[in-house]
Image (spheres, rainbow, N blue to C red):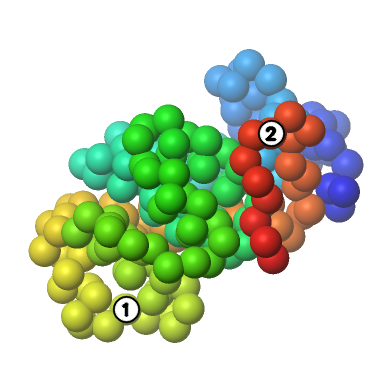
Amino acid sequence: MARTPAVTRESIPEDQRATFDEFVQGRGEIPATGPGSVLLYAPAVAKYGLEMARYLRTDTSLSPQVRELAMLVAARERDCQFIWNAHAVAARRVGLRDDIIDNLRDKKELANLSPAESAVVSYGREFFRTHRVSKATFDAALAEFGVLGLTELTNLMGCYAMLAFNVNAFGVELPAQRIEETLPI
């Protein structure tokens, strides 16, 4: 159950309502669920944070498969049911193998990964688990994606960790209609 009531224009401080209005006008509605439903309590955070998430999710030099895998690694490592649910479907849609998605969800061995997939998983897991990335892991990801791609990958995972923190902290519920199995946590 969500820990706060749904955000409304009236629940926002008056000096932030113009940004709230701009955000809602751009979206066409007040988000009822997901990260936007939380971040909109701080309209400028929603405006800039979700724009960054959109950019990293759709417009980077990374392939759609790499981007979705990075979001899944962040969701899994942060035990975020909401982001997992949204992006497992998207990952399947862009061609990420079912066994990778299912084994990542269930914390099973990931076999037969491509060099790009291996670089994403190793880089993300190592950082989320140790708060650092070893030289070997960094160098492998750098060789795979270049400086631009690795910078984008790092920020994509960090951005989705931030979104997961908000969704988990505020108790955002999964949609009633979902396809994906929940994370075993």
Q: Where is residue 14 in the image (x, y as percent from the top left)?
A: 77, 36
Which residue was labeled with disc 2?
Answer: 178
Q: Position of residue 72 (x, y in %)?
A: 48, 52
Q: Is residue 11 visible?
A: yes
Q: Residues within 10 Å of mark 2 (few under 14, many from 20)?
A: few
Q: In which quarter of the image is the C terminus?
A: bottom right
Q: Nearer the viewer, mark 1 or mark 2?
A: 2
Q: Which amino acid is tagged 1? A: Val
Q: Which residue is drawn at 36% across and 32% down?
A: 94
**Residue 133: image tag:** 1
Cα separation, mark 1 vs mark 2, equals 34 Å
- Taking the image as shown, residue 100 lies to the left or right of residue 76, namely left
Q: Which amino acid is tagged 2? A: Arg
From what the image shows, is residue 180 above or below residue 183?
Answer: above
Q: Which residue is drawn at 75% across and 47% down?
A: 172
Secondary structure found at label 1: loop
